[in-house]
Amino acid sequence: MLRFIHAAAAVLLVLALPACGHQVTGLGKTQSLVPSGEMEIIFGTQAPINTQLYSYLIVINTSGDQEPYWIGSSSNYEDWTFVMQIGGASPGFLGGVSAVSTPQLYQVITDPQEGVGYLGYHVAAVPLSVFNVNTSFGGGAFTNGFAVTFNRCLLDRNNPLTSTPAANTGTDCPPYSYINENWAINIFTVDATGAPNDSLDDNGATGTSVQFYVDTALQINGKVDIKGIIAPLSNPAGEIAGIEVFSQP
């Protein structure tokens, strides 16, 4: 059974560029790193984003052992821990003209009684100092897209079904109380019907070959995965170019 338990609000825009071959590299833009305890995730698209037509999702598995693929949506969101959403209807991940006015952060949790995952949401007041909107940038691997900058402690949340929802909003993560330091990340575009349009995988929306991992205990100055385009999509606003990550212990 799926329910919605929304976990926060406030995230946004910045970079991306047409991809010409799938590759992962540790090289990125030549700006200074994000502050200590923070991470920036840059979602690259082939054209400027269109939040009236698509939802743009950053999916993070904070257990870090398995890449989150779109099959998670048909298997109780297995390997999905958090979802950052730009655009789309609220609640949920649908795109279309009823796009949400602010970005959303969802926590995917496991029902301790049923032993399966379900999606839920609860609104959390999040200070801009730990989870903010970035609408400008300089340099980088991509020309189009958006960037999310946040304090990693914001994702250090327990299961709200087993105890009172809580989150660490400090600035000294790791160590964490509820999650691991190794994270697996995937990104998706979703159309107005709720169907996946594209993912970081070279094989498209439902591909299961890409693997993108981040060790939050390390300094990361632009880890880039440029997606290979096997079959270009009809609308480049919904086509993923790649991802770039900055993180500071």
Image: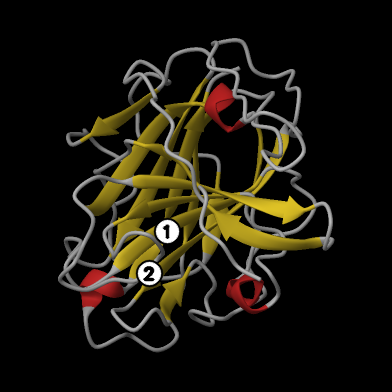
Asked which quadrant contains residue 161, the reply is top right
Q: Position of residue 61 (x, y in %)?
A: 66, 50
The residue under label 2 is 189
Residue at 56 percent across and 62 percent down: it is 3
Given the image, on which type of amino acid does mark 2 rest?
Thr
Inspect this view and state whether residue 229 appears: no
The quadrant of the picture occupied by the C terminus is top right
Look at the numbered disc 2 and give the secondary structure of its residue: strand
Is 78 displayed left or right of 122 in the figure? right
Mark 2 closeness class: few <14, some 14–19, many ≥20 residues within 10 Å: many
Given the image, on which type of amino acid does mark 1 rest?
Leu
Residue at 68 percent across and 69 percent down: it is 76
The quadrant of the picture occupied by the N terminus is bottom right
Q: Position of residue 51 (x, y in %)?
A: 20, 63
Inspect this view and state whether residue 175 appears: yes
Tags 2 and 1 touching, CB below 8 Å = yes
The residue under label 1 is 57
Q: Position of residue 167 (x, y in %)?
A: 59, 24
Determine whether 131 is above or below 7 in the image. above
Instruction: Pick the residue in front: 140 or 53.
Output: 53
Q: Position of residue 177 (x, y in %)?
A: 76, 23
Residue at 31 percent across and 28 percent down: it is 132
Determine whether 104 is above or below 69 in the image. above
Look at the numbered disc 1 and give the secondary structure of its residue: strand
Instruction: Pick the residue in front: 249 or 109.
Output: 109
Determine whether 53 is above or below 150 in the image. below
Asked which quadrant contains residue 212, the reply is bottom right
Work out how far the residue at label 2 is from the one at label 1, CA to CA, in angstroms.
Answer: 6 Å
Mark 1 closeness class: few <14, some 14–19, many ≥20 residues within 10 Å: many
